[in-house]
Amino acid sequence: MAEILNLRQARKKRAKAEKEKAAEANRVKHGTPKQLRDLSKARSELSRLKLENSRLDHDMDKDK
């Protein structure tokens, strides 16, 4: 036989799980100190610039 399910409790449990998921996302987004965010941003910018500087320019071949 199937298990009897209280719909009100099921809705509350689902809403609680969704709120917890949103809270976890907010903790990740807003829980990082500003110094670490700035450091992370600087590192990603530095790696992007290194990548841009190491690219081969194929534009010169088009001029010939």
Image (cartoon, helix red, strand yellow):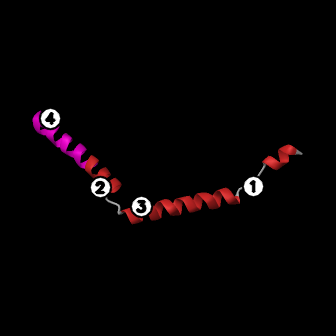
As helix, strand or loop, the secondary structure at mark 2 comes to: helix
Alpha carbon of mark 2 to alpha carbon of mark 4: how far? 39 Å
Q: Dot 4 corresponds to which residue?
A: 2
Q: Amino acid at mark 4?
A: Ala
Mark 1 and mark 4 residues within 8 Å of each other at the beta carbon? no
Q: Quadrant of residue 8?
A: top left
Q: Residues within 10 Å of mark 3 (few under 14, many from 20)?
A: few
Of circles 1 and 4, the one toward us is 1
Alpha carbon of mark 1 to alpha carbon of mark 2: how far? 41 Å
Q: Residues within 10 Å of mark 4 (few under 14, many from 20)?
A: few
* First of labels 4, 3 by sequence position: 4
Q: Dot 1 corresponds to which residue?
A: 56
Determine if the magenta segment contains residue 44: no
Q: Is residue 4 visible?
A: no
Q: Dot 3 corresponds to which residue?
A: 37
Determine if the magenta segment contains residue 19: yes
Alpha carbon of mark 3 to alpha carbon of mark 1: how far? 31 Å
As helix, strand or loop, the secondary structure at mark 4 comes to: loop
Of circles 3 and 1, the one toward us is 3
Q: Which secondary structure dominates the residues rendered in magenta?
A: helix
Residue drawn at the location 66% of the way across and 56% of the way down: 52
Of circles 4 and 3, the one toward us is 3
Q: Nearer the viewer, residue 45 or 1?
A: 45
Question: Does residue 28 appear left or right of residue 64 in this picture?
Answer: left
Q: Residues within 10 Å of mark 1 (few under 14, many from 20)?
A: few
As helix, strand or loop, the secondary structure at mark 1 comes to: loop
Of circles 2 and 4, the one toward us is 2
* First of labels 3, 2 by sequence position: 2
